[in-house]
Image (cartoon, grey):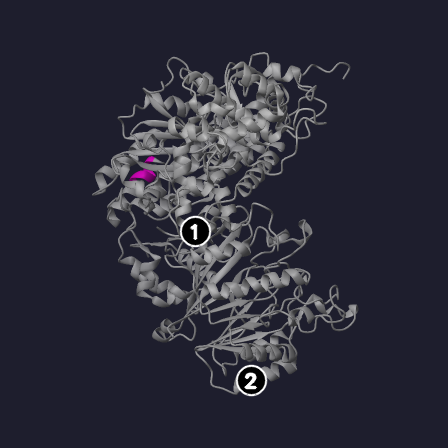
């Protein structure tokens, strides 16, 4: 396997309620005459025919990072799960792997009697993983609900799905457990034993709903991160089980960053929401998005990197539909990950090759000379552009993406 | 052919689409040929009539991506390289607020001109960057990197720009930043920082750049530096009616001063009525046919739109359906076009006992005494219509059939308690050409209906059920009526109409419905209206809104002006979607004056001239 393609959907927030209180674009019954003005329904068409790719979008696995519905509404939960099952088929993916979000569990007992996960347990095919192998999926489901995590393997990739909302509905209101995620020390210890039972694969993916550590630059009053997240990250960064890609939802805020740790720090993709009506602080900072993560196992091996890949992102907007992400909100249409640059050294290298170039160098030309630079996360690329400027190398980088570098400079 | 790409159809409004997306679904109307000629051209149409799509198709990126079968019929490479300039609504609002303030009004023109020129130059560069890329085909520009740097240096000098890199992208980005600076100057003025703003104005000579000279310089420089390049360019300005009036007038005058044998052409789009255009049409103003051509995207006579509508619908059907059934079989026959049937078809239509026309006329005659009287007076024998040899009387039959169709559908038999009956999905409006007439050749509507039918699974059937077709049209009519409700109309200064401009249109529709359905049978009831000078200003303004939204259609006849500023003396009809809502036949007959309609309308007491309110 040279490449593992992971389609990522998060925070669909489907609702069967009318009116604006549901704060979502995804309805079980869309307004009459506007069947395509719903990001979930129109995703079918994007998968068949993305505007910026010559081929339909296909993936090896489809991940959903929770909050399929809004306020645990049973009909909408089923609607979203059915859509995910359909997308798995359309993508040609071996598996759909999901996790529960705080909105999926009936933690206020609105629909069930003290059975927060009752509706989810009745989903068909069984939640959280669907591979088409009924018994395997049934076992995965039992493991997930009994031990708060489950493992699914796709080729050279190991996917761990964690239920960070496992304790919602537990305890009295004073604990307000539903306000945040949680992974307990016992869960982490169990997971450690599971991981240690077999050799490290080429790639590990951890799927969870809540963010394992705080995201500091948005919604500063939010403390909903996963309690015990530090211990979980400690496990991932140990390097004992291979390199990790963490994909989470909940924040509706699209961002890619590296977690705490040294050379084994996990890459963390905070997936934007597919369907929520973004309001307040988020409305001008992120957009409704869908992602295709391409983990380039071949390039990683060739370049001596433990992780290398790109993320394609598409934006959805009411009355416009799905488009390659160029809004400047959320993740850009194409970004990389895996290479953590030594910025001063990289500046020197680029300045050196640009000296000989007439007029300017395109970023593609730079990446042909230094292939690892194609795998920078957006904030590292922006930091590199800034450092180049500070050292006197003119850079054209609209929206932080480097386009061209002045030639004959230095 | 490629399967239907609903993503590209999904956004009905071409404004948000990129050139290749527009090309993906583009079906050319006949007028596309005129638009491609090397003359200045003005495209006129209401919202949704496809103006933006047409203009966006003039870009080389769109033409390169266009793979329709009819492509070879158009002389694409012989023409010009189009550079599309969209309208910046936010910017326009900012300028409007400057204009509204006497203290800042003097700066508004120079800023709007500067902003517009900046937008044009950015667009030229974007287009040039595409033609210089490896993807370009038709207008491929070959520029070495050093020639590109040289070109950028020359342009930067002439356009007062300071790109950070000597590349087309660098220059484009510097113009993007310039647009932001112009916005800042406007904002400084708005908050009253006049001294700073006037200093800024002096410091920015680019605000005085002449758009034609600047473009001409680019073409000249390209000629020297590029090994291959387009020699003729068109500045394509969409929604010119939204541009500040002075700028609009100046651009319009440019059509005259820049003759079309030069290497710069203008292609504009306008709504049917654009304020101030009459004053632009002076003897020394550009002359239609001589200095510029006009392309209309509305069809006063519905048949004119059929070819385009059929091409568009069949292009979609061919991507959706496995068979190759033509639209006429999928949607069936249309009663409101039965009058075109002659000879054998006429005889089949009116033959007893099964001819559709025969059944319609006899059904009405059985329940409508006034129609029976009409038949007798005209010496028509409904049982022997196929034997009619008199052409005039056959024409009467065809004409009577249209009125009979709606009377038979909606009238109760004589002697019933009520005159009209409720019909949930009146299938009299179904059929292929009725579909086209109801959509008025408006691609947004046509596409919307086909997509809705597809999503409802109806296009998997051999033919679309007639009641299902009609349900779609009523849903479209409801959406359009809701849109019209949001357009303000105040028939009375104290009381804005609850339904906005729709309340005025409903008065007109109700009047026509009374004449067609409630009055004794009349073969020629009025179904269009003329606007006299006695119509008060606020009603005129509401009609202008209705015209620009496509709710009323200008019935332009030979000799009528193509561009109108005021509606006085002109004839209009309701669009057929509203006509259907009012149970009217989809035909336009003789006009009646609007003032007659308003004065006899029992439902419209507020529609009187607005009088000054006493003691207020």
Which residue: 52% across, 23% down?
B573
Mark on residue B149?
none
The residue pinned by badge 1 equals A398
Residue B515 lies, with reference to residue B469, above or below; the image says: above
Question: How would you rate the neighbour count of disc 1 (Cα within 10 Å): few for under 14, some for 14-19, many for 20 or more?
Answer: some
Which-is-in-front pick, marks 2 and 1? 2
User: What residue did someone put label 2 on?
Assistant: A194
The Cα–Cα distance between marks 2 and 1, rounded to whole angstroms, is: 45 Å
Picture quadrant of residue A336 = bottom left
Kindly state the secondary structure of the residue where label 1 is placed. helix
Q: Nearer the viewer, residue A209 or B206?
A: A209
- In reply to whether residue A133 is colored magenta, the answer given is no
Which chain contains the residue that carries disc 2?
Answer: A
N-term mark: 2 or 1: 2
| Residue nearer the viewer, B306 or B330 | B330
Identify the magenta region. Answer: B153-158
Is the residue at mark 2 from the same chain as the one at mark 1? yes
Q: Which chain carries label 1?
A: A
Is residue B157 located in the magenta-colored stretch of the structure?
yes
The residue lying toward the viewer, choosing from A305 and A43, is A43
Image: B25 above or below B363: below
Q: In this view of the protein, which residue sits in the foreground, A403 or B123?
A: B123
**One can see residue A320 in this view:** no
Magenta segment main secondary structure: helix
- Residue drawn 79% across and 71% down? A172
SS category of the residue bearing label 2: helix
């Amino acid at each position: 396997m040279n490449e593992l393609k992971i389609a990522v959907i998060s925070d669909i927030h489907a609702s069967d309620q009318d009116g604006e209180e549901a704060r979502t674009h995804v309805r079980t019954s869309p307004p009459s005459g506007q069947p395509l003005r719903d990001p979930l329904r129109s995703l079918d068409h994007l998968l068949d025919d993305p505007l910026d790719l010559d081929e339909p979008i296909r993936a090896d696995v489809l991940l959903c990072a929770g909050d399929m519905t809004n306020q645990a509404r049973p009909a909408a939960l089923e609607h979203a799960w059915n859509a995910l099952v359909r997308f798995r088929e359309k993508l040609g993916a071996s598996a759909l792997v999901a996790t529960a979000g705080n909105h999926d569990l009936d933690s206020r007992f609105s629909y069930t009697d003290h059975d927060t996960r009752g509706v989810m347990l009745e989903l068909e095919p069984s939640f959280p993983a669907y591979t088409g192998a009924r018994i395997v999926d049934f076992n995965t489901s039992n493991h997930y609900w009994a031990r708060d995590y489950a493992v699914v393997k796709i080729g050279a990739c190991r996917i761990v799905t964690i239920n960070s909302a496992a304790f919602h509905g537990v305890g009295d209101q004073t604990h307000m457990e539903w306000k945040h995620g949680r992974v307990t020390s016992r869960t982490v210890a169990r997971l450690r034993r599971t991981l240690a039972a077999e050799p490290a694969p080429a790639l590990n993916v951890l799927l969870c709903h809540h963010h394992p550590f705080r995201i500091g630059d948005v919604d500063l009053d939010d403390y909903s991160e996963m309690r015990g997240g530090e211990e979980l990250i400690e496990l991932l960064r140990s390097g004992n089980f291979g390199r990790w890609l963490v994909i989470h939802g909940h924040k509706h805020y699209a961002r890619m960053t590296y977690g705490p740790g040294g050379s084994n720090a996990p890459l963390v993709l905070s997936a934007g929401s597919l369907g929520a009506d973004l309001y307040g602080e988020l409305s001008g900072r992120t957009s409704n998005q869908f992602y295709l993560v391409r983990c380039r196992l071949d390039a990683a091996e060739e370049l001596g990197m433990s992780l290398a890949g790109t993320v394609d992102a598409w934006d959805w907007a009411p009355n416009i539909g799905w488009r390659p992400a160029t809004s400047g909100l959320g993740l850009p249409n194409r970004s990389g990950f895996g290479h953590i640059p030594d910025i001063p050294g990289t500046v020197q290298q680029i300045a050196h090759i640009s000296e000989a170039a007439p007029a300017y160098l395109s970023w593609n030309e730079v990446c042909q000379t230094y292939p690892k630079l194609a795998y920078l996360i957006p904030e590292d690329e922006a930091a590199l552009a800034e450092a180049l400027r500070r050292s006197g190398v003119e850079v054209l980088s609209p929206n932080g993406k480097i386009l061209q570098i002045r030639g004959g400079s230095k | 052919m490629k399967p239907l790409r609903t993503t590209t159809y999904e956004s009905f409004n071409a404004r948000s689409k990129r050139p290749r997306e527009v090309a993906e679904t583009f079906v050319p109307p006949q007028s596309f040929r005129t638009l491609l000629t090397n003359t200045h051209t003005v495209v006129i149409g209401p919202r949704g009539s496809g103006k933006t799509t047409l203009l966006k198709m003039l870009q080389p990126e769109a033409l390169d991506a266009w793979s329709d079968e009819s492509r070879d019929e158009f002389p694409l490479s012989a023409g010009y390289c189009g550079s599309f300039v969209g309208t910046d609504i936010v910017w326009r609002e900012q300028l409007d607020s400057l204009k509204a303030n006497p203290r800042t009004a003097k700066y508004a023109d120079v800023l709007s001109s500067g902003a517009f020129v900046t937008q044009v130059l950015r667009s030229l560069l974007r287009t040039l960057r595409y033609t210089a890329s490896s993807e370009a085909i038709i207008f491929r520009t070959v520029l070495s990197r050093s020639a590109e740097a040289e070109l950028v240096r020359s342009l930067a000098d002439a356009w007062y720009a300071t790109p950070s890199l000597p590349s087309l992208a660098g220059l484009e980005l510097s113009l993007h930043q310039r647009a932001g600076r112009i916005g800042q100057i406007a904002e400084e003025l708005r908050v009253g920082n006049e001294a700073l703003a006037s200093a800024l104005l002096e410091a920015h000579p680019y605000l005085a750049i002449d758009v034609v000279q600047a473009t001409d310089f680019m073409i000249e420089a390209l000629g020297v530096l590029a090994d291959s390049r387009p020699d003729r360019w068109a500045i394509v300005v969409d929604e010119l009616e939204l541009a500040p009036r002075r700028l609009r007038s100046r651009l319009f005058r440019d059509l005259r001063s820049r003759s079309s044998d030069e290497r710069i052409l203008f292609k504009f789009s306008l709504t049917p009525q654009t304020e101030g255009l009459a004053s632009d049409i002076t003897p020394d103003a550009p002359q239609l046919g001589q200095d510029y051509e006009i392309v209309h995207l509305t069809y006063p006579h519905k048949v004119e739109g059929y070819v385009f509508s059929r091409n568009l619908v069949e292009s979609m059907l061919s991507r959706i359906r496995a068979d190759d059934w033509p639209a006429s079989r999928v949607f069936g026959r249309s009663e409101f076009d039965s009058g075109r049937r002659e000879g054998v078809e006429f005889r089949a239509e009116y033959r007893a006992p099964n001819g559709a026309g025969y059944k319609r006329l006899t059904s009405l005659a059985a329940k409508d005494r006034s129609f029976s009287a009409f038949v007798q007076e005209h010496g028509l024998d409904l049982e022997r219509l196929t034997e009619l040899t008199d052409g005039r009387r056959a024409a009467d039959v065809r004409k009577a059939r249209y009125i009979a169709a709606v009377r038979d559908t909606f009238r109760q038999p004589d002697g019933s308690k009520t005159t009209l009956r409720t019909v949930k999905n009146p299938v009299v409006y179904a059929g292929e050409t009725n579909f086209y007439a109801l959509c008025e050749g408006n691609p947004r509507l046509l596409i919307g209906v086909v997509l809705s039918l597809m999503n409802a699974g109806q296009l998997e059937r051999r033919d679309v059920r007639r009641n299902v077709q009609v349900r779609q049209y009523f849903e479209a009519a409801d959406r359009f009526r809701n849109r019209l409700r949001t357009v303000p109309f105040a028939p009375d200064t104290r009381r804005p109409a609850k339904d906005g401009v729709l309340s005025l249109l409903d008065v007109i529709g109700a009047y026509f419905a009374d004449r067609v359905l409630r009055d004794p049978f009349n073969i020629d009831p009025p179904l269009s209206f003329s606007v006299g000078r006695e119509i008060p200003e606020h009603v005129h303004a509401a009609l202008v809104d209705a015209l620009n939204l496509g709710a009323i259609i200008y019935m332009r006849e030979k000799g009528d002006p193509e561009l109108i500023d005021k509606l006085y003396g002109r004839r209009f009809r309701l669009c057929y979607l509203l006509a259907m809502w009012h149970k009217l036949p989809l035909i336009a007959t003789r006009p009646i004056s609007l003032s007659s309609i308003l004065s006899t309308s029992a439902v419209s007491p507020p529609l009187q001239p607005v009088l000054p309110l006493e003691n207020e």
